[in-house]
Amino acid sequence: MRKVSAFILLAACFWVNTSNAKELTSGRAAENFTKGEKFENGSTFDGYPIYPGDGAWTIDRISNTDSGAQREAQSVKFGSLSLRQIDPAGYWLASMFVTVNSSTVGGNQYYGGNPCGGQHVFVESKISAQNDNCLAIDAGSYKAGAESNTYLRISVTQTRSGGRLYALTLVLRPDAFGFKNTTPNQWQASEINDDPRRQEFMAKLRLLGQQLRDATEKAIAYDKPKDAFDKVPSFHSLMP
């Protein structure tokens, strides 16, 4: 059995109009998008379906890279897609980062490492044999000028034979969901249990994460089914 390096894994139920859907190809990134253009619902990335959210994503970045390979393993090509949303007031609302394999190799090649290892606010793994299938939720912060802002992050990772990978990260600004001026510590399990509102919201966030995990599990199949995310609601369903 061959393994490739896992470092690359570290690099979120509405009817949608797919009339303008297109294929975005990481290998020709510069020719396939303009920064800030609308991501058309139903579009695919290196053949894989993408979570539509509420249908308001814009494209921030497309890139591609090769994996590191160990011993006799073959290198795998990857595409990375970065999408974002700005709310009507001009504030950052959400970002989504998707990394998928844009090439495949021999069937007996898997990924090493543990993409959901370490400490998380919530983690749930359904690893089967050599296949990763995991969900992690975290809270962190970022600087915007002199201000420190909290974010919540859902990460799901699927790996399969042949060098297949589907890693999705959905990052949300909790202020937009009714939780202004919180700190990352207030989203830890011990703190959440002291606040019924945050406890209820985290339960909804876990459910959305599980739905995304199940959808990516479907999406990573060799036929890359275009309906993989059809039953996953918009993250706006988290709104109070």
Image: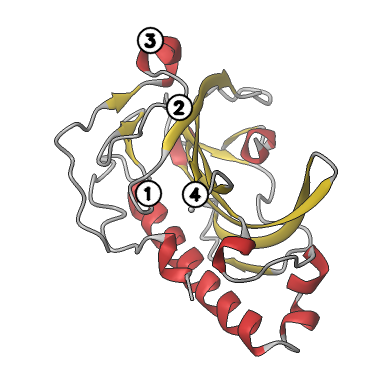
Q: Estimate the x, y position of residue 122 in percent, counting from the top left.
A: 66, 70
Q: Residue at x 26, y 57 (%)?
A: 230
Q: Estimate the x, y position of residue 181 in percent, counting from the top left.
A: 75, 65
User: Please, is residue 151 above or below residue 165 in the view?
Assistant: below
> CA separation, marks 2 and 4?
14 Å
* Residues tagged 1 and 4 counted as in contact (Cβ below 8 A): no
Of the residues shown, which amino acid type is indicated by label 2?
Answer: Gly
Q: Estimate the x, y position of residue 3 in percent, counting from the top left.
A: 61, 35
Of the residues shown, which amino acid type is indicated by label 4?
Answer: Asp
Provide the residue designation for mark 1: 51
Provide the residue designation for mark 2: 36
Provide the residue designation for mark 3: 31
* Residues tagged 2 and 4 counted as in contact (Cβ below 8 A): no
Of the residues shown, which amino acid type is indicated by label 1?
Answer: Tyr
Provide the residue designation for mark 4: 87
Q: Quadrant of residue 41?
A: top left
For numbered disc 1, what is the local secondary structure? loop
